[in-house]
Amino acid sequence: MGKLVEEFNSYRTKMNERIMDSANTNIKRFLALDTTSYADGALDVKTKEMLGLVASMVLRCDDCIKYHLGKCHEAGVNTEEMNEIFMIANLVGGSIVIPHYRRAVEYWDELCTG
Amino acid sequence: MGKLVEEFNSYRTKMNERIMDSANTNIKRFLALDTTSYADGALDVKTKEMLGLVASMVLRCDDCIKYHLGKCHEAGVNTEEMNEIFMIANLVGGSIVIPHYRRAVEYWDELCTG
Amino acid sequence: MGKLVEEFNSYRTKMNERIMDSANTNIKRFLALDTTSYADGALDVKTKEMLGLVASMVLRCDDCIKYHLGKCHEAGVNTEEMNEIFMIANLVGGSIVIPHYRRAVEYWDELCTG
Amino acid sequence: MGKLVEEFNSYRTKMNERIMDSANTNIKRFLALDTTSYADGALDVKTKEMLGLVASMVLRCDDCIKYHLGKCHEAGVNTEEMNEIFMIANLVGGSIVIPHYRRAVEYWDELCTG
Amino acid sequence: MGKLVEEFNSYRTKMNERIMDSANTNIKRFLALDTTSYADGALDVKTKEMLGLVASMVLRCDDCIKYHLGKCHEAGVNTEEMNEIFMIANLVGGSIVIPHYRRAVEYWDELCTG
Amino acid sequence: MGKLVEEFNSYRTKMNERIMDSANTNIKRFLALDTTSYADGALDVKTKEMLGLVASMVLRCDDCIKYHLGKCHEAGVNTEEMNEIFMIANLVGGSIVIPHYRRAVEYWDELCTG
């Protein structure tokens, strides 16, 4: 596992554990919804993770992008497909997305060579 | 064709024609990219239109939502699938998306009964 | 009840009923969270509705603004307090909020004279 | 004066008067800043109005766009220049800006033929 | 004082001093408004800081979140109240807020143990 | 060249090269548009870079801000003009822009003393 992936996962795991201790019931329900919404259903996991990724890119949240890049990789999205997602994100979100796209490419490269 | 769909299509067509007259070369290139990016490729049209829809919903652009709802309908997205897209959009974008979701349901109903 | 308030409530009620028919379980859970999060708790309803309003204003969602203006009115927010919320929303969100502020003032006036 | 321009100006004037009655001191200071920031200075009015317009377009506020289109027209921006502003707004803000661009073209046409 | 709090305060203080040297009159007026708007008035400081925090969270500005977390702590917001603010921010802003929520929890913990 | 400028340019150059290897045709066309849209035309390069900067500031993208600050510096924008752009960005985008404004001032200082 590459350095960027490890740093992201490690901080996320640490804080999610802290949140499970500190959060109230509604927050825990919200986080549970965040998990179940990406489960296999009428749409498969791969499609849903691509949806989560493009939404994260146009809203320009680097951590959310990293999370869904990891999930897309697990779900078998290949690089040619990923480039078409990147294009739609750049197009819809505009050139303001480009710096996030650069970091996404760097992270995707690490996932693919990891 | 229902009233909402017709009004949307009619204004969009009128202004796209006006834009083809008035826009400069770069704008025309940008609009051409907007078309070709949703064409069949490594990802099929249905998947790309779902990506365009979820991006439009989290960015809360009613006209963009209507456009991609129409394209999703043409591409064969069914209502069960649409509900899962709606859920991801509401979840990622938050309750601020709900009024747009209401209007999307109204438009989708019209598309489905049209 | 004034015209703006009635139109808003009427469309919202109609579509919420339609959504209760058409939505999937996760969407219904999300909408339930949207209700329970504003219930009396460590913070009272008035404070929570002011939080919901300022969030809606900086994110510039007119329907969300109308909804929370109505709830703030029910919870006893007065006009002097409302002006301080409006100021924080304009300040944090910027002059891009001003057109939404204009419409909020119009709606608040209707609530107060209704 | 065309219909779109008249409707926009009329509502804006009415609500600005109402706001001058109802707003608190800080809001009035904020609105005063909104005026003085576009005054002639190190940058001229025309440049500042173009800055205000592009900011309004990428933030996708139709009323703000209309306001700055009117001011750009008064300041002597021509259609060729306007198209280059439109292009930068579409590019930076992405295709999500396109519906606002359509309405901007319609409003600009009215200003130019008015 | 914890490390995150110290780093944030130190950079903020350094740059605010630099800005007082370099900014023009309008910017200084804007920054003055940013201070006076949170002063005790019809709403008390605690309520206003909670409003500033929720606005900062849904707009996803980590530095603004840190600033208002510090001010909320000074104003006596307790952790149970903070969790209800966090919930409203996550709900309104959506799951895209979660990474900012994680960092907010980390910062709040430091404030509470500092 | 100062440290912030060098770090920004170095990462940007590295990733742009990687993107030229990995991107698909549409992405390359989009990036080409991103270049040609800022070229001298009806509006000169200086004006266009100021437009790009204000758009980047209100959308709060630090990397985009750095890029356009560099270009504005090359195009001869002086500090008095820059302060008026900063004011419009703070005003339109709101106090949520202030942390980005701080970092912009730091970067601009480095450009001016570099």
Image (tube, coloured by chain):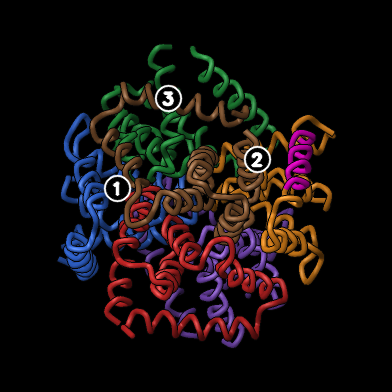
Chain colours: A orange, B purple, C red, D blue, E brown, F green
What is the spatial separation of the Cα atoms under label 3 and label 1, in whole angstroms? 36 Å
Q: Is residue F108 above or below residue D8?
A: above
Q: Nearer the viewer, mark 3 or mark 1?
A: 3
Q: Are marks 1 and 2 in contact (CB under 8 Å)?
A: no
**Picture coordinates of residue F40, whole percent (x, y):** 35, 32
Q: Residues within 10 Å of mark 2 (few under 14, many from 20)?
A: some
At 59% from the left and 58% from the top, the residue drawn is E84
Q: Amino acid at mark 2?
A: Asp
Mark linked to residue D82: 1
Most extreme residue toward the front, as rendered?
Answer: E76
Q: Is residue A31 above or below residue D77?
A: below
The residue carrying mark 2 is E109
Q: Are marks 3 and 2 in contact (CB under 8 Å)?
A: no
Asked if badge 3 and badge 1 are on a common chain, one would say no
| Of residues C55 and F114, the one drawn nearer to the viewer in this rendering | C55
**Picture coordinates of residue C74, whole percent (x, y):** 42, 75
The kind of secondary structure element at disc 3 is helix
The chain holding disc 3 is E
Q: Is residue A15 magenta?
A: yes
| Of residues A113 and B88, the one drawn nearer to the viewer in this rendering | B88
Q: Residues within 10 Å of mark 3 (few under 14, many from 20)?
A: some
